[in-house]
Image (cartoon, rainbow, N blue to C red):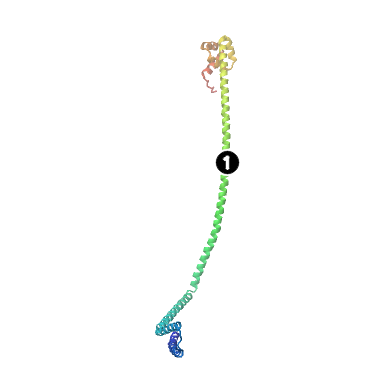
Amino acid sequence: MKTGYDQFFQKAKQTTTTQKRVEALQTLRKQTSKKPKKKFPVAQFFMFGILGIAGFLAVDHIDSIESQFKKIEITMGVADAAEEGHASEAKATDKHAGPEGEKVASAKEAKEGAEKSTTKEKKPDDADYLFKLAERKKALDLREEDLNKMATELEKQKADIEEKVKKLEETRGKISTVLQERIKADDAKVETLVQMYSNMKPQQVAKVFETLDEDLVIDILGRMKKKTAADILNLIKPEKAQIFAERFTGYRAPANSN
């Protein structure tokens, strides 16, 4: 069976042979009919030679050119057949897949939708987390401010207390000084009384001691000479003398059980 390429190459052979013959006859006619000119047409002769050589080469290699075109046609046919086979296989696969393929596609779409929804949901969660974090920071800042105020107030109160304690210590020192001065003054007065009562008669001193403050009497007797104190106690009433003696020694009579 002859293909379009076979018919083309046969026609090309016939045409080339016919053209070759016609060109040869025309060349002979031109050579015989034309008169000799002064100038020889070098350019035309050169072009004619090239065309003639090309024609002879085409006739000699017409078989190889035809075989190359056949190879190209076979290759194109094989490629078309392969494409048709792949297309038929894809269609068969789609037919056999049926509901399972649809299930896989729907599952894939559902997964992609879930991922998109998860991504969309994460954004509000992140925003909420950042909002809560900012609120927490604000609360901590307020708490820190309150603590700083409390610390300042405590420092102020501490300074006030220290100032008051300092004033109390100063007052205490003043009182202690006054008391020491008062004690010294009283001691000087007691010494004066001791000297006075020591120079008086024992009978007069005994009468005075019976009505005088007991603590003062004991203090005076303690500073007198022993003989003078003994003479005075000898003249005082026995009950009163007993009390003075007990107080002087620090003795306390036991309380009555009745």
Vertical placement of 126 versus 66: above or below? above
Q: Which residue lies furthest to the top in this view?
A: 201
Residue toward you, 9 or 22: 22
Confirm whether residue 121 shows in the render: yes
Q: Residue at x 57, y 20 (%)?
A: 181
Q: Position of residue 210 (x, y in %)?
A: 58, 14
Residue 233 location, quadrant = top right
Confirm whether residue 215 shows in the render: no
Left or right: 140, with 28 as reference point: right
Q: Position of residue 160 (x, y in %)?
A: 58, 34
Residue 191 location, quadrant = top right
Residue 24 location, quadrant = bottom left
Which residue in the protein does label 1 denote? 150
Characterize the local packing of mark 1: few (<14), some (14-19) or many (20 or more) Cα atoms within 10 angstroms. Answer: few
Residue toward you, 244 or 229: 229
Vertical placement of 46 versus 114: above or below? below
Q: Where is residue 7 in the image (x, y as percent from the top left)?
A: 44, 87
Residue toward you, 47 or 119: 47
Left or right: 108, with 56 as reference point: right
As helix, strand or loop, the secondary structure at mark 1 comes to helix
Residue toward you, 206 or 190: 190
Q: Which residue is drawn at 56% across and 19% down?
A: 184
Left or right: 62, with 192 as reference point: left
The N terminus is located in which quarter? bottom left
Q: Position of residue 235 (x, y in %)?
A: 56, 11
Q: Residue at x 53, y 15 (%)?
A: 223
Query: What kind of residue is marked 1?
Result: Met
The C terminus is located in which quarter? top right
